[in-house]
Amino acid sequence: MSEAKNVFRPANLQTSSLASCQVCHHTVPNRQQLILGSKAEFIMATHKLFLLPGDGIGPEVMGEVRRVIQWFQDKNIASFKLDEGLVGGAAYDAHGESISDADMAKAMAADAIIFGAVGGSKWDTVPYDKRPEAGLLRLRKDLALYANLRPAIVYPALADASSLKRELVDGLDILILRELTGGVYFGEPKEITELGNGQKRAVDTQVYESYEIDRISRVAFELARTRNNAVCSMEKRNVMKSGVLWNEIVTQTHKDGFEDVKLSHMLADAGAMQLVRTPKQFDVILTDNLFGDILSDVAAMLTGSLGMLPSASLGAIGEKTGLRKALYEPVHGSAPDIAGQGMANPIAMIASFAMCLRYSLGMGEWAGKIETAIALTLDQGLRTSDIMQDGMKKIGTTQMGDAILAELDALA
Ligand code: NAD
């Protein structure tokens, strides 16, 4: 296997052993040594993280990640160099932009970006190109973050919070891999034209080139190798030319050094059905921007709550860092309705940091420990208000952070 093809794992890493998933307690290939990029750093490297807390509950949940980072430093497990910037409404208030050029430069130079959330009604009237979300879009665009990873993991203690029956989701651990920079959201022409007869015509264009499909397929196969080794690619080849090409390139890339990974194809509509019928049949779902947007939201609801969902967006390997450009963020927004009240659930943010350890920093073992600490905290019956259930104990953001750190301490 050549280094160029094996972009997630340096050649000297071994990932073949089997381990029990610390969240779901089922057997999965060992993920402990996964790293994205070609730079393997095992001896107390200093990892450069750029924190962008953003607006609303962003700074509150980021505060808990800071404590987890501090825990790693205090225990001498890892060394981090932190820098912090402004994004979204906070950046607009300070600089009149949703992210400044200086902060963009820091983002480009970091080993990984940890992003909170942006937005809020305070900025509803700012110019469109300066709205809070524009900061996140600029990061995604300038860092060319083309691969969006959305794990859907159901913690056993929360299986009853899913919209599906417990037996269908208990132990669920799937990964939706969505292509993020191509397809119908960006294709040209994209317009509404007057037809002159009182009618209008709206056009969006679904465009994919082979290289875009090839590179995201490689990410899917590499990720699958660190999990249950199966990729299901979803498109609509029965009605869309882009689906025909998608299917062809995924199949071709699979033959180019990834035949050890099980590959299947499904029409995206059938895939949506299967996702709510028997979600545990999947391991990695590979799909385009549009279908990925929809399918990842479906998968999100299988897990119960927005406050629990982490994500990662990955790009090309940086020339200076030797690491894949990467941004880690919770799926949820800035939750203005609960901001400033100490009620926000920090789990999605902390789990996003765990993804950073696994996918950017080669610390998969510690990512697993964080996930186990979260699962054990939930097992104790501790809940923030968004995931509150009868008979459980309601706690706030900091108490949830305390409890997770206490479990992490016990696991260390
Ligand atoms: P939201 O995700 O902020 O909130 C939806 C609901 O879920 C709210 O009731 C909120 O209180 C709750 N919630 C979300 N995260 C939670 C957490 N960690 N703990 C407890 N409860 C949580 O979505 P919204 O209300 O549609 O949007 C609010 C703002 O966030 C808007 O300005 C929107 O544009 C922005 N937004 C930003 C991002 C991002 O930064 N990536 C994503 C989505 C929405």
Image (cartoon, grey):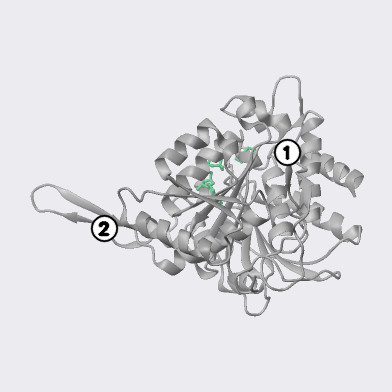
**Label 2, on which residue?**
191
> Is 304 positioned to the left or the right of 351 in the image?
left
In the image, which disc is placed on residue 24? Answer: 1
Q: Residue furthest top?
A: 391
For label 2, the crowd category at 10 Å Cα-Cα, with few meaning under 14, some 14 to 19 and many 20 or more, is few
Q: Is residue 143 depicted above or below 115 in this figure?
A: below
Work out how far the residue at label 2 is from the one at label 1, CA to CA, in angstroms: 46 Å
Query: Ligand 1 within 8 A of label 2's CB?
Result: no
Residue in the picture at 41% in, 45% down: 267
Instruction: Write down the quadrant of residue 128 in the picture.
Output: bottom left
Relative image position of residue 189 (x, y in whole percent): 27, 62
Mark 2: secondary structure = strand
Q: Amino acid at mark 1?
A: Cys
Q: Is residue 279 depicted above or below 123 in this figure?
A: above
Cβ atoms at labels 2 and 1 below 8 Å apart? no
Q: Amino acid at mark 2?
A: Glu
Instruction: Write down the quadrant of residue 79 in the picture.
Output: bottom right
For label 1, the crowd category at 10 Å Cα-Cα, with few meaning under 14, some 14 to 19 and many 20 or more, is some
Q: Is residue 215 visible?
A: yes
Instruction: Name the front one of labels 2 and 1.
Output: 1
Instruction: Write down the quadrant of residue 360 in the picture.
Output: bottom right
Between 18 and 165, the one lying in front of the other is: 18
Mark 1: secondary structure = loop
Q: Residue furthest left?
A: 197
Q: Is residue 53 visible?
A: no
Between 107 and 207, the one lying in front of the other is: 207
Residue in the picture at 74% in, 54% down: 31
Q: Where's the N terminus, which quadrant?
A: bottom right
